[in-house]
Amino acid sequence: MELENDPLLRVIRESWGYTELRPLQREAMEAALRRRDSLVVLPTGGGKSLCYQAPALLADGVTVVVSPLISLMKDQVDRLIGRGVPTAFLNSSLEWEDRRRVSGDLARGRYKLIFVAPERFTGERFLASLDSVGVAAFAIDEAHCISHWGHDFRVDYRRLDQLKKRFPDTPVHAFTATATPRVRQDVITHLELKDPVVLVGDFFRPNLSYRVERRTDAFDDVQGEIRGRSGQAGLVYCIRRADVDDLAAQLKRSGIRVAAYHAGMSDEERTRVQDQFTAAEVDVVVATVAFGMGIDRADIRFVIHAAMPKSLEHYQQETGRAGRDGKPADCVLFYSGADYGLWRTLLTQHEPADVDHKMRMLSEIYAFCTGARCRHRSLVEYFGQAWRRVSCGACDVCKGQRAALTDGARLARAIVDGIMRTGQRFGPAYVADVLSGQVTDRVTERGHRDLAAFGALAEHPKGALIAWMSQLVDQGVLVRDGEYGVLKLTMSGWKVARGEAQATLREVDRGRSTKKSRRRKELGVPAKVEEDVPGGPGSVLFEELRALRRSIADEEGVPAFMVFSDKTLRLMARAKPSTRSELLDIHGVGPTKVERYGARFLKLIQMRGEGD
Ligand code: ADP
Ligand code: ZN
């Protein structure tokens, strides 16, 4: 690297000790030095901070960095001071006296960089103080927060539309790790960037390997992944705080050095966890989304999602924290239909703003989970980049970990047929209701109980049917149309319907039914013994009925016992009812449940009952 006569590179070498630049860092810094507005999109860990920090040292005046992450400001400032850069931060965490001191030093031109929270721009005072200081540039970190279309909209960020009005000649540099083309445009519009240099990094992270599986049991699944990785650093993400606490406690009991982290904990506790993780005193942090922005640990070897996140942006950002040292790391996502239901409830009840948009993002990640399309490709394309490889070689789909089903062609044709017969007017959940023979009000009202397609695939859980529909979309047999994702046939869909072409379907669960028992055996845990036996635990049919109950519970987002109790299932396994009225005779089975679940349980009993 030609360092001696390039002042920028000299500064970087002397203050940071870096001998090379990462992709697009040079372009981003050159834009800054030429005082051009810019939008820089680099994946997490791509080195965005250097892009505004190094040019700040060479500029006249102070560079104002806007960041939403108050908790990280102090850290960043300390590090810069350690590199000999005069820096400070201004936010609500400062005592009045410190704030006055920093404001005074800022006015006296003592700083090269000042970190501020976006709400500083609410009042006139701060803006007025900047007038007199001489601002070299504004750097907006996490710039996607300005956009409604992003995954993390913050009202405070909207104040930043004042910047260009107030400081028309001061360059503004926007940085983000996650921005779809639409969010990008929104950032440019709201910040009123003038003819900006737009730099978008490569989102393909070949050292990350992706795998997506349907969840059997959060603890079993997660612990199964972590076992054999002792001493490795990892993150486990859950949806809710209570899940974090539960899972962390269970993992701790099984001997893993683990800590919990979520927004319900005090600032001190959270800082402690962050410090312990950085210092490698704990290996695994179980967290909600609150954890991770700015984690400075490059050797994270695995990121496990114990449940589905609410958007692909979140997923990309959270998995992006793995393997920042460039060495291989694994990203495993366990999902279930229940996650979709839970998010829908949380979003509609607690985050009603833009709920339609959020639901669309939720559907997108659900399609990602249930589909069988290269994971890397899906993520890269979601972020608006072209995919030019045949296979990534680093995801469950490309590695062929999902076996093709032997009767896939028949199933595919039955699904396509169901969509055709219901008039191509419904989304996957409804089509699955019809195919699996659910007697819901909607199905009855529309007369779809009379179709040949009704119950044609009753032996398969609804979740699997939905997953296969995603796979057919991925293969171009079906398309999702409009806001509600109505499924329609493509040209090749019609060929499948006429039997002129065949589609392939892949299994949805890798060896799912046996996984738990196998693990129990490995761990030397005996299967739970229950007394009043015939048809009890150990009976194949009983276990299958439980598995069916579990998928139904997952799909509906309700606890398993709400479907049927263990006792009822045991009675069912013993009595092997073959009609609805025989089913009704069983203790714990009422008319509503017969209507809702009867078809699937009867079908299973009929199929399996004979040999048991
Ligand atoms: P981002 O904000 O894009 O997620 P950071 O700016 O926090 O990324 O940088 C991630 C890590 O990479 C930091 O530890 C940083 O010190 C390091 N880093 C950034 N640029 C370089 C470089 N050119 N050479 C070596 N390390 C770098
Ligand atoms: Zn792949």
Image (cartoon, rainbow, N blue to C red):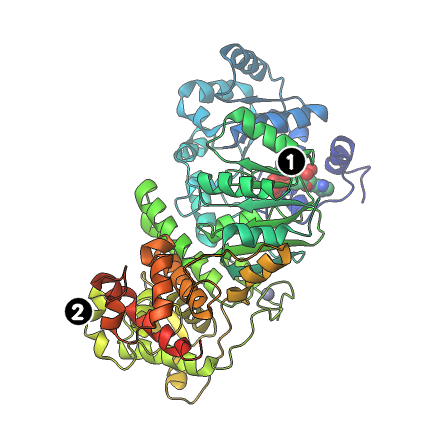
Q: Under tag 2, what secondary structure?
A: helix
Q: Which of pointers 1 and 2 lies earlier in the amino acid sequence?
A: 1
User: Secondary structure under badge 1?
Assistant: helix
**104 lies left or right of 187:** right
Q: Residue 445 carries which label?
A: 2
Q: Position of residue 410 (x, y in %)?
A: 43, 83
Viewed as shown, does residue 600 lie left or right of 85? left
> Looking at the image, in which quadrant does ligand 2 appear?
bottom right
The answer to whether 532 is drawn above or below residue 145 in the figure is below
Q: Can residue 51 be seen in this view?
A: no
Q: How crowded is mark 1: few (under 14 residues within 10 Å), some or many (20 or more)?
A: many
* Relative depth, front residue between 225 and 540: 540
Quadrant location of the N terminus?
top right
Q: Where is residue 577 in the image (x, y as percent from the top left)?
A: 30, 73
Residue picked out by circle 1 = 277
Q: What amino acid is found at the position of numbered circle 1 in the picture?
A: Phe
Q: Which amino acid does label 2 sit on?
A: Glu
Camera sees residue 559: yes
Mark 2, ligand 2, within 8 Å: the answer is no
Front-most of residues 384 and 29: 384
Quadrant the C terminus occupies:
bottom left
Beta carbon of the mark 1 residue lies under 8 A of ligand 1: no
The residue most toward the left is 445
Q: Relative to 99, does residue 610 appear above or below in the rendering? A: below
Residue at 46%, 29% in the rendered image: 118
Count residues near mark 2 (Cα–Cα under 10 Å), then give few for <14, some for 14-19, many for 20+. Answer: few
Please name the residue shown 76% across and 39% down the image.
18
**Is residue 8 left or right of 71 when viewed as pictured?**
right
